[in-house]
Amino acid sequence: MFDLTCRGSSTTQPTQLFAKPQREPLKGGKVRSGLLARLMAATALFAAALQPTIVTAQDVQNQPVTTASATKRPNILFIIADDLNARLAPYGGEAITPNLDKLASQGLTFDRAYAQYPWCAPSRSSFLTGTRPDTVGVSNLTTPVRANLPDIRTLPQYFREHGYFAGRVGKIFHQGVPGGIGRAGLDDAQSWDVALNPSGCDVSDEDRLVNLTPGLPLGTAFTYLQHDCQDFQQTDGMVATQTIDLLRKHAGGDQPFFIAAGFYRPHVPLVAPKRYFDLYPTEGIRLPNAGSANVLPAARTWKNTDNFGMTEAEQKAFIRAYLASISFLDAQVGRLLKAVEELGLADDTIVVFTSDHGYLLGEHGEWQKQSLFEESAHVPLIFRVPGTKNAGKHSRRTVELLDIYPTLTDLAGLPHYRRNEGVSLKRLLDNPEDQSWTKPALSQVTGGRSVRTERYRYTEWAGGTRGRELYDHAADPKELNNLAADPRYAGAVELLRAMLPPAPVERLADKGSYDPDHDCIVPASRYTTSRGATGGGAPPAGMKICPGD
């Protein structure tokens, strides 16, 4: 049995500003001298940690690489969902997820885990290289992971070079959905021994979709389908089947494995067998308190704020489809977990479950991703490590997807990869409430930077020139009351601002808008200047440009 018994480094970590809720705000920028000294010192540590590591070619050459380990190392099963927010039962959400509930009961759930860039390709490029978005330099859906870091060792590649079999099924590096399903997309060939790209009935039956927002690109449009195909005929069902085949093939051998299962739901189109929709009666669907009146223009992902012309009934139908897709995903995860048990792998296989980012469902009047609000940046993250003494527990410490890479190498006993910019979570797996863990989480989008501590979220747009946001999660977990201009919180703003990345912030992206009366869009520049968009080829499937644009 692989046993988690060795505690990680006790080195002081960067600050989680005001981690324990305080009822009185900081007034006039003043805090008690002891607390201020601690926070300022920790902020300095964090700023130093953000400075890029200078890595020479000699450093890369000197990284130890082995083809086999002296003792059997733990296997890794890495499960990634697509566009999945934290509306799961382990997080108090309404989605029905008995298999993820079981996984949480066997492992440790991180309550405050965050994506570094809440958009598909940028997020995956970050956590699969263990580097921050500004380091890997991916901020769109077309840039390969090695465009700016040609010699980087990705997470699966690192395990492969240390004697592991590395295989993937489905979406791990970025693939367009639905257009890229069944294709390699931006996959990284040198990361894998085997890479499989299934495609099921959900792709072949796209003409049957219910489309609530015609004119939006198909991978963005609010679409769903209660499908009559069975689970195993859907792409995600095929991802589960082919992953189980890989597990079966590599169970019991001398070579450990790193197998990644990349599911496509709940990314739109929200296609799932009808029985999963039946779990959610329409009358039970509730719309969020949008709170859109106080949202900064810079914080919006689209110019218009009318829910894309969807009626309340249509919004509920879409949310219902999203929840149904989560339950369908959960069933496929359950198949993987069952296979791990039946193949005798449970005692020596680490299982990690997460998503590339969250997803807004009408909160703040916003939908989907590429937002720095909580629902967009927050992700589920569950680690099941054999031999853990903390099964079923939760950690309230703030962590990042960036931390997965160094955590897995640490747990597997592999040398630390110097280019990792995250921190191993092994200490928290040993002690979920470790009070010395003071690391905040950073998230960003084009023109925006955000820092999340256990109590606060602070966001700046265009370096603060286009607005600032401060939310006190102790009193305002829905982020409805922006305190950035409140003089009582000047001290908090000053310290949180110092935690943001020091690199220059790019120009704030322009916003597209949707015309529901004519089913067309006035596109943002990313649609008119990106490869394959209106400026460099045919528009994305389903996209209709408004006349005159």
Image (tube, grey):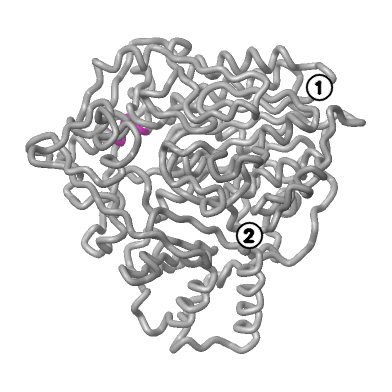
Q: Is residue 175 above or below residue 250?
A: below
Question: Looking at the image, which residue is at 56% across and 17% down?
Answer: 196
What amino acid is found at the position of numbered circle 2 in the picture? Pro
Query: Which residue is pictured at 67% across the width and 39% down the height?
Result: 153
- Quadrant where the C terminus sits is top left
Which residues lie in the magenta part?
A: 318-322
* Dot label at residue 74: none
| Predominant SS along the magenta part | helix
Q: Tell me the amino acid under the disc marked 1.
A: Gln
* Residue 453 appears in the rendering: yes
Measured Cα–Cα span from mark 1 to mark 2: 35 Å
Residue designated by label 1:
255
Image coordinates of residue 509 in percent, x first then y, are 31, 54
Kindly indicate the quadrant of the structure image that contains residue 214. top left
Q: In the rendered image of this protein, does residue 519 appear above or below residue 136? A: above
Observer-nearest of 63 and 458:
63
Check if residue 320 falls in the magenta segment.
yes
Mark linked to residue 52:
2
* Left or right side of 218 for 161: right
Neighbourhood count class around disc 2 (C-alpha, 10 Å): few under 14, some 14–19, many 20 upward: few
Q: In the figure, is residue 340 to the left or right of 524?
A: right
Membership of 167 in magenta stretch: no
Sequence-earlier tag: 1 or 2: 2
Q: Secondary structure at mark 1?
A: loop
Q: Residue at x 65, y 54 (%)?
A: 421
Q: Position of residue 522 (x, y in %)?
A: 17, 43
Q: Residues within 10 Å of mark 1 (few under 14, many from 20)?
A: some
> Where is residue 335, by image quadrant?
top right
In the image, residue 185 lies at what x, y percent?
A: 47, 26
Quadrant location of the N terminus in the rendered image = top right
Task: Please say if 212 is above or below 426.
Answer: above
